[in-house]
Amino acid sequence: MMVNWIWLFLIVISVIFGMINGNMDGITQAAFDGAKSGVTISFGLISIMVFWLGMMKIAEQAGLLEKLSRMLYPVVRWLFPDVPKDHPALGYIMSNLSANLFGLGNAATPMGIKAMQELQSINPDKHTATPAMCTLLALNTSSITLVPTTLIAIRMNYNSANPAEIIGTTLAATFIATGAAILADRWYRNRDKGPPVPYKKQNGLSTAPDVHTPSTVTAIGGGSGNG
């Protein structure tokens, strides 16, 4: 992956400059300090992540996630009109958005990956991202966050006087970012709009996109049950 090469490049450059400046001890110390900070932060995140993942599991068992998915379904169908209505990708997309609403990026990631895999399964050109893939990536990156759980946990770990004070500003920032992402997505879709490419029929699913809302929607657990 490109990210691995970027990190390798940064590490190699750091070592080279450390050798040139005769500061290898500083590089070694920085490496150990970074590893220590990573472990410390990870342990600090465990408690609040476990709490919110547990809450989402309770919500799933109580049927709240299914109700949330029903609420999100019309919006998801509007955002992803080219995905067949019965395709599993829609369930993973709704779970991804639900997890992001509560700031559970770690829980949202596996759902986003599964959604991308399902979207790839109906991609007629395996080497080119579909509009639905681009839409999902934009929404996952800019998703509206009601409670920035992970950021609050990090602020608590660093002894912030008021860890939750960022809720309002985070909500405003993510709301604007999501609005901008949707506007850009609509603009590109309308600009490049052409004759629809028929999807291949797979697993008995309908090949024609359908914009009508079904009477029932099966929600897929938002990370805690499937991660």
Image (spheres, rainbow, N blue to C red):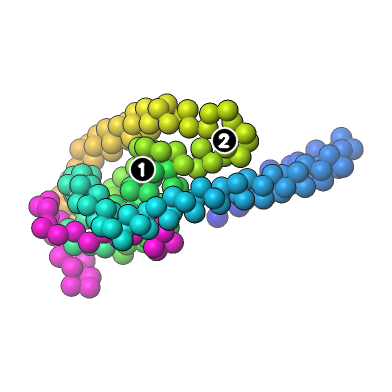
Residue 162 drawn at (x, y percent): 53, 28
Point out which mark residue 176 bears. none
Locate the C terminus and report the quarter of the image it occupies.
Answer: bottom left
The numbered mark, 2 or 1, whose residue comes first in the sequence reads: 1
Residue pointed to by mark 2: 155
Q: Residue sitting at 63 percent across and 36 percent down? A: 158
Identify residue type, mark 1: Leu
Q: Are marks 2 and 1 in contact (CB under 8 Å)?
A: no
Residue 138 located within the stretch drawn in magenta? no
Mark-to-mark CA distance, 2 and 1: 19 Å
SS of the residue under disc 2: helix
Choose mark 2 or mark 1, whichever is in front. 2
102 shown above or below 161: below
Range of magenta residues: 198-227
Q: Quadrant of residue 127?
A: bottom left
Q: Residues within 10 Å of mark 1 (few under 14, many from 20)?
A: many
- Quick check: 137 left or right of 66? right
Q: Nearer the viewer, residue 220 or 92?
A: 220
Point out which mark residue 101 bears. 1
Residue 20 drawn at (x, y percent): 86, 38
Identify residue type, mark 2: Arg
